[in-house]
């Protein structure tokens, strides 16, 4: 029995019943729910929302124009400085003129919508909790371990280093997923070059140590919510990877924690959101920050997004990562234990979204 406010209920049975529908949150909404079920209730956190507060209007997450990065060395230096500052202060920035055409971004979001708009019976083919699969569709990867379920469904596609065959990808978004993933991989390599330069390292450093070797694409759907104040689209979490490149639609709701305030990260047409993940914070010895973020639930929806995670995740790579030696000056000793991406990912998944920071467990 679990007590949520004045309600007491058998949480485990309700989680099992929800999971057994294999229809996700979208299935609840399609069936016409007018109340948020108790398994989704999320306690309010202590942080304040900044965006409506005029005194906090200086809180603007940078939008960085990448135009000219490879043509003009002065322009490149300027961009590297902006990326350096954003990665230190915010852990988040948006990029425009990143080289991926608007038509590809739009079609990617359409592909995600097309997948979720299919009949539940068709989608069920992909519904699983077997995380060894390269394509996993379900609602809340940590449904049975997290304190609150999120108002969100996800298709997870592990793309690199071991790509799925085209046949393993859902037809509804297959072609655009392949196109988008190729373009994001190129952008990711450029971003890791800029981040290496921002750290004062050789431009190829982060790519050479394998930061861009692994890629997983998470296609999220946040259905319209009848009581958005009672739950969240995604609870407070940081990302477990090296770097995330996120495509969000026009609806909004993504917020970043900054100086104890939730700051809106508003959709900018044609932009991609970039954020530093836990593993990049670990190897940069806290120079770049992996910052907590969340997604509000909304009466408007469904909101869709595609988050590309640069990580080899649970693959068998034995490569060991620890704070980069070149970044340690004499008085700046390593703050983290070494780990493999797999060990870090397993620990992170067990700690769960909305839980405490998994990274802090690797601190020396
Ligand atoms: O959908 C979003 O805007 C954010 C998704 C996210 O934070 C994640 O996939 O880790
Ligand atoms: Fe995230």
Image (spheres, rainbow, N blue to C red):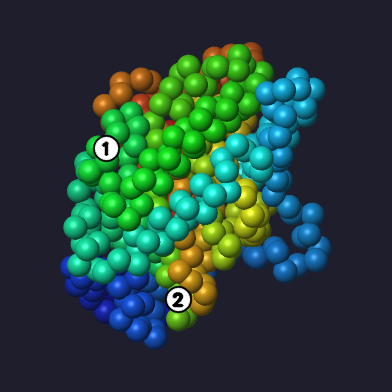
Label 1, secondary structure: give it. loop
Marks 1 and 2 sit apart, C-alpha to C-alpha, by 33 Å
Q: Residue at x 32, y 55 (%)?
A: 172
- Residue 208 at x, y = what percent? 48, 17
Quadrant for residue 75, please give it.
Answer: top right
Q: Is residue 67 left or right of residue 99?
A: right
Q: Residue at x 39, y 84 (%)?
A: 35
Q: Nearer the viewer, mark 1 or mark 2?
A: 1
Q: Residue at x 35, y 83 (%)?
A: 33
Label 2, secondary structure: give it. loop
Quadrant for residue 29, please give it.
Answer: bottom left
Taking 112 as reference, is 89 above or below it?
above
Ligand 1 is within 8 Å of the C-beta of the residue at disc 1: no
Tell me the residue that label 1 is attached to: 164
User: 118 and 239: which one is in front?
Assistant: 118
Circle 1 Cα neighbour tier, 10 Å, few/some/many (<14 / 14–19 / ≥20)? some
User: 187 and 51: which one is in front?
Assistant: 187
Taking 273 as reference, is 10 above or below it?
below
Q: Is residue 346 left or right of residue 269?
A: left
- Residue 334 at x, y = what percent? 53, 22
Q: Earlier in the sequence, mark 1 or mark 2?
A: 1
Tell me the residue that label 2 is attached to: 225
Residue 61 appears anywhere in the view: yes
- Residue 249 at x, y = what percent? 54, 59
Quadrant for residue 79, please give it.
Answer: top right
Q: Is residue 121 left or right of residue 87?
A: left
């Amino acid at each position: 029995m679990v007590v949520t406010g004045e309600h007491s209920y058998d949480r485990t049975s309700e989680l099992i019943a929800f999971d057994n529908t294999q229809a996700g949150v979208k299935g609840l909404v399609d069936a016409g729910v007018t109340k948020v079920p108790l398994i989704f209730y999320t306690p309010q956190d202590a942080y304040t929302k900044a965006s409506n507060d005029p005194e906090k209007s200086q809180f603007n997450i940078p939008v960085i124009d990448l135009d000219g990065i490879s043509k003009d060395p002065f322009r490149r230096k300027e961009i590297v400085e902006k990326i350096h500052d954003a990665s230190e202060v915010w852990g988040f920035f948006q990029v425009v003129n990143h080289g991926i055409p608007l038509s590809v971004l739009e079609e990617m979001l359409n592909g995600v919508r097309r997948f979720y708009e299919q009949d539940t019976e068709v989608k069920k083919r992909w519904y699983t909790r077997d995380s060894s699969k390269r394509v996993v569709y379900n609602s809340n990867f940590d449904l049975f371990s997290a304190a609150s379920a999120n108002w969100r469904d996800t298709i997870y596609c592990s793309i690199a280093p071991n790509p799925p065959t085209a046949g393993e990808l859902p037809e509804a978004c297959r072609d655009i997923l392949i196109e988008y993933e190729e373009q994001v991989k190129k952008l990711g390599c450029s971003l890791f070059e800029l981040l290496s330069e921002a750290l004062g390292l050789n431009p190829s450093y982060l790519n050479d140590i394998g930061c861009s070797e692994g890629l997983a694409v998470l296609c999220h759907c946040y259905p319209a919510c009848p009581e958005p104040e009672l739950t969240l689209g995604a609870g407070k979490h940081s990302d477990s990877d090296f770097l995330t490149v996120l495509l969000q639609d026009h609806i909004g709701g993504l917020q970043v924690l900054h100086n104890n305030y939730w700051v809106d990260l508003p959709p900018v047409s044609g932009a991609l959101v970039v954020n530093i993940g836990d593993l990049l914070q670990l190897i940069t010895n806290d120079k770049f920050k992996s910052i907590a973020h969340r997604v509000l639930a909304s009466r408007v929806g469904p909101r869709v997004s595609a988050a590309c995670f640069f990580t080899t995740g649970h693959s068998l790579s034995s490569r060991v990562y620890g704070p980069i030696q070149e970044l340690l000056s004499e008085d700046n000793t390593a703050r983290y234990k070494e780990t493999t991406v797999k060990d870090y990912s397993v620990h992170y998944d067990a700690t769960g979204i909305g839980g405490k920071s998994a990274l802090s467990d690797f601190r020396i």
